[in-house]
Structures are given as structure tokens and as C-alpha cells.
Amino acid sequence: MLVHKFSRIISGGMFLFLVSCNTLAGSPTLPPPATQVATPTLPPPTPTPPPDPGSVSKAYLEAWQVGDYAQMYSLLANESRAALSAEDFAQQYQTELDKMTAIGVKAQIGNINQAGQSAEVSVAVEYTTALVGILSTPITLTLKAEGNQWGVVFSPTLIWPELVNGQQLLMVPLLPERGKIYDRNNVPLVAPDEAYAVGLVPVELGEDSGALEGVARLLGLNIESVVAQVQNALLSGIGDQYLPLGEVSAAELRGFDFLFNLPGVYLTGYTDRYYYGSGDAAHITGYTTFIREEELAAYKARGYAGSERVGRTGLERWGEDYLRGRTGGQLQLRGADITQFIRMIASTPQLPAQDIYATIDFDLQQAAQFALGDFTGAVVVLNMDTGEVLALASSPTFSPNLFSPGNRNQVLVQSLLNDARAPLINHSTQSAYPAGSVFKIVTMSAGLTSGLFAPDTRYTCTGEWNETGDVTLEPRKDWLEGGHGELTLTEGLSASCNPWFYHIGFGLFNRNPDWLPQTARAFGLGQLTNIQQVEEVPGLIPDPEWKRQRGETWGALDSVNMAIGQGDVLVTPLQIARLIAAVGNGGTLYQPQLVWAIRPPEGEATFTFRPIISGTLPLTPEQLEAVQTGLLNVMREPRGTARDKFRGFSICVAGKTGTAEDGGLFGTQEPDAWFAGYTCENRAGQPDIAIAVALQNRGGGSDFAAPIFRRVVEAYYGLNYTRYPWEEAVGVPRVDPTPTPTP
């Protein structure tokens, strides 16, 4: 109110002054005396005292503790700002803090001594560092009065008191050797080793084909593949350039010494972290690369020196904290000449890394990778009764050795990253496919648990289906022309009769549209398996709510499509392997795990594997037995879809074929081939296994996936390999076959 009143009074006074001026201008007559206006009484102003040394020091230190270098710079004395730009000031602080690996700073003001126009303020500083722990030191702020202001006089001693006469800080990181990765049998998967990059210069090759044959045998490549690469290079006019082919360890090179003397063959040695078998376990081990510039601050805050390579995928990434150990450090005071050691300020020893032992059997892993050949897809092998991952193969694969900076073949990294086939993708866990007829295991189970169907319920498969009553719909066909005739439900699973499962899907829709999706989720589909050690996607099990959220309505045909694993159903090979393992082991869903143990080079294990139960299948023992019988008869009965592939097979196996339509653009793609099954040998000391095979856009499940399943079983039990229908000999492909697909 006082301010408003004062404004009105001033306005009135101005009005009187203007009136007086006008009167003078209009007449020589003097105006009468002006009426006196009372002046309000205001309290005398309280002057703001100039900042004192203590408050300026406090503001400077508070800004420092939050990294506000602009505010700190504004509090400097004029002479300091004249000598140092704001950018250089901030850089000097940041450089020294980086040397210390400081991730935090605290400052506490002590005594303040003022003498005229100068002052000194003692400060206790505590740095929290990533490498050497807590550093405590006193510093002294010097301030000068400049008019009514006080300013901080900057010198490097405000960061560390011994930074005088050009003396400087030096952090010497103590890096532990990165931990190794082994398989369950102590076979090294990743370890430091002497290695060789293998390549050719085509125009330098002699007439003798021994060079190409020797390189192919050394690298485990088909000779035809090596010859084709050489010919392509020559035809492309780059035959005089180095053609990288692969890497081997020094041990793997023994017996191939003759290659050193052959013209056109180049073996370039290097020592680094080596991935044995090159791409045979690439998606399990993952790979490492150097810390990128944009990541540096975050990694340094975690105690990294910044020069390390870090895990990017697989066990290398998941186990980073185990494999890296703990970096130690020595913070030293050096002279103006950096080679002059003055004293050790602080030191923390390094802690050794731990080694990771994977659950995989490397021999089986290599066999699974070999079994896939050049197909795009995956093979997953689980211990049926524990969830241990025994093999996790994905194709196409890649060599993690390409990311080694000393490897001459590193030139292939860019082409690897640009490869349209996406070799870095783990198709076991990161690719989700339509399930096809493998899903009929779920559909049969949903039918049984609904009470609408029993194992001996009969249905006549005429080869066509249309129960919707909509005469405008084209009848749905069975994969077998003319149909299968009368089948029980268990027989329908073995024969993979599509109309039988359309019938179940339609019946379940009318009973409860959510029943089939809910059953699928109870089997572990449409969700992460929580394998953790490798990246995975959840896939998709659609349901009425999912459709509603997209502005659509769930209809009978959605359930009918789902019943044969089509529509919007998407599953990963790992999910199917876990599902089939649960069917085989009596109904227990285990969490898949890739780590058997973690232990330091010397000492006890800090982690050992134990099974983790994720859930139980919603089936009674009698219902589960009916499903198992149907899967056994897939291999045994005349109408079983895989009988021809397992006729006379000495190992007890049960499984399900699948041929999933995955049309791609305009429906031109070949279907995805599936086979999922398990062994039922019940051998002491050799656990039964569950296997899922998925081949992208390959063809019929029985024709392609089932033979690969058989080969993996043969590898596990030490049997001779059966030649694939598409091979001239084991491991030697011939021209692509075109068999008739089966579901």
C-alpha cells in the first residue's frame, strides 16, 4: 500500500508542475504560491553489504560440487578471468578430475583469514574416485577484494595443492587380465592365445590346388566355397587383393605348417583374446569392442580406465562384471617432466577377473552349428530335466575374432555389419517365427483341458473344413489331399491333420475365445524365457484383448488360425525347446540357463548352476501321457509325419513336425520348417535332451528340420551321421532339393 500511495503522490506533484509551467508560458503574472503536498515518511534504505570472502568461497565450492564451472568462473577475480577463458578454466578442472577418476567431490570450509583487501580460506576437500577410493586433501582459496566484490584467485592448487611448478598428476591403471570362458567340460571357448589370420591373394596362387584344399581343411570350410570366393575375386578384378577367410589358433595350425611356404597363402600372426571355433559359439560368447567416446564418462564412473574392451553381446556382455575383475590404480605426482616420479599419492590393487563356465557342451555345440549348414535358422538343445542349455546354434554365424584390433581380417567387420542376412542376430532367441504345426501340441492340450475333447475323441478328416456356416468362405484344406479319414485326437496329432485342429480351434472359440491363448501362455509362449545371458524377444500370442487394442474384433477364424500355429502367432526356437522339454519331462517348465559356474582362477566358485522352475503345464498326468503318445507316434506310426526320417533309428525319440506359412511380400516365401522333440532313453549318466530346430523359409518340417534334429541326436549319442537328402556326402551339399512339404 505504501508503494501505491507514494506513486499517486508523485503523479499529483507532476500534474501541479505542468500546470505551473503552462501558467508561466501564458502570462507574465506570477502564480500564487503552490499548495504544499505532504511527503510520506519512508524507512531509511538498508544497504546490501558487499559479498564477504566466506560467502563467495561458499558459492564457489557449492558450484564445484555440482560441476557448474560457469558459475565458478563468474566468481573468479578479474585477473584470473583475464588470464584464463571460461572454456580453459572448465577444461583444467575436468582434466585433473579425469586423471584422478573422480566421480564426486565434497568441500568443507574451515578457517577464514582476512587481511585488508585479501583473504585466505582453508578448505577440506574429499574426492570420490573410481580407481583409488577416497582422496582427502586440504586446499587454500585465495580471494581479492575488487571494489565491493571479492573474487577467487585461480591456480591449479585449488584442485590439488601439489600442482605447482608444472607438477602434474598421473593415474596408472592396473588392469587385470579379462576372464576366460569355458564350456561345462573345461574346454576353452574364449581365452588369450596366439592366433593367425588366414587369407589368400588369388593371383599369387600356383597351379597346385593343394593350397586351397589345405586352407579349406584348416578352417573347416567346404573346398567348393573357397574355390568360389577365389574365382569371384578374379572375375571381379580384385584378385590381386588380400582375401580374408578365417582365423585359427597356433595350436589349431599345427600340422598345417606347409601352408607357410605356399604362394598366395597368407598367415598373419597376432596375440589377443581368441574365440575358439571362430563362429561355432559366437552367439553364446558374444564379442568385445573398445569403449566408444560417447560411453567413456559412464564407464569411467564404474571404475574403467577407458582403454579396455567391453562385452557387447552374449556372455561377454552379461558377465562383464565377472570377466573384467576390478581395475586398480596408482595416482602419482610427477614433475613437469612426466618421467620424473615424485611420490605415490594413492594406490589400490587390482582384483583378478573370474572365469565363466557355460552350460554348453562345445562338441555338441559345434555339431549343432555344423548341422545347420548354410540354412538360416537355429538349433536349441536343452537338458530336458534341468533347463541347462547344451547347445544354442544360430545361422548365419560370424567370427567374434573379427573384432580383434590385431586381426588382419578385421577388414571384414564393415561387411559383417552390412550383411543383409544379419549374422549378428541370434535366431535362437531374437527371431520369432510362426509356429506352424508344432503349435498343435498346445491346441491338443487346450482341447483336453477344456473338457470338450478326450484323447480318444474321433473326428473324420475329409481333407476340407468349414464349420463356420459362412458359405462364402473357401473351405480350408488339409495338407494331405483327400484328408486322413477317421482319427482319434492322439492320432490327429501324430498325423498333423489340419481339419482336426481347425475343429478344436472352432470349438474352443465357441466355448471361450481366451482359452487357447491362455493355454499357450501356460506353455511359456508369448513371453520371455528369462534366459538372461543372451538377448531374447517375447514373441506373440494374440488374444481378443490384443485385437481390441488395435481396433479389431477377435473372430472364429482367429482361433482357427491359431490352432495350427498360424495367424499372428510368433515363437522363438528357445521357447519351443522349453515347451517340448516340459512335455517330455512330465510337465515342468524350467528357466533356460547358460552358466554352469563362475569362479576365480584360484578359489571357490562364486556361482554354481541350480535348476529354476518357471511353471508347470496345465495337464493332468493322463492328459500329458496322451500328448506324449501322439509325439512318439509321429516317429513310429505309418501316418506319423516323421516316420520315414526315423525308420530304424536306434534312439527313442518323440517329436512334432511343423511347416509354417511365412509368406513375406506377396506370399512368395517358402514356409518355415520346424521340428521339436526329445529323447526318451532314460540312460544313467546321460540326461535326455529336448531339441528345437527352426529353418527360415526352407520348406517342409519333415523334409528339412527333422533330418537336422536326427543329426543332433546322433552327435549327442556318438552315432554315425546319417547323410541329409540334400547332401552328396555328410557335410557336402548338392544342388538344392525340392521335396514335397509336410506339416
Image: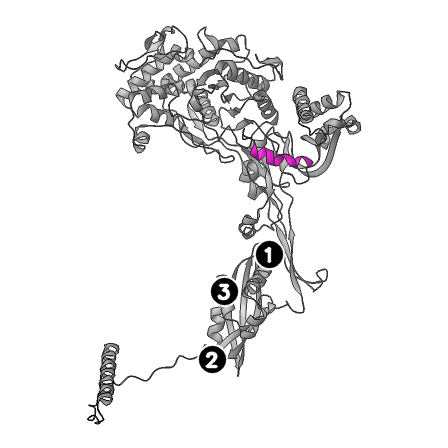
Q: Is residue 285 visible?
A: no
Q: Which of labels 2 and 1 is toward the front? A: 2
- Kind of element beneath mark 2: loop
Badge 2 or badge 1: first in the primary sequence: 1
Residue 305: x, y in percent? 61, 51
Badge 1 or badge 3: first in the primary sequence: 3
Asked if residue 35 is positioned above or below residue 364 in the image, the reply reads below
> Which residue position is annotated with label 2?
148
Q: Which mark is residue 70?
A: 3
Q: Residues within 10 Å of mark 1 (few under 14, many from 20)?
A: many
Residue 155: x, y in percent? 59, 70
Q: Amino acid at mark 3?
A: Ala
User: Image point 58% across, 24% down: which residue?
Assistant: 369
User: What stretch of residues is rendered in magenta?
Assistant: 406-422
Q: Which of labels 1 and 3 is toward the front? A: 3
Residue 409 among those drawn in magenta: yes
Q: State the image quarter where residue 491 is shown.
A: top left
Asked if residue 613 is positioned above or below residue 152 in the image, the reply reads above
Instruction: Give the number of marks.
Output: 3
Q: Amino acid at mark 2?
A: Asn
Q: Amino acid at mark 1?
A: Val
The overriding secondary structure of the stretch rendered in magenta is helix
- Kind of element beneath mark 3: helix
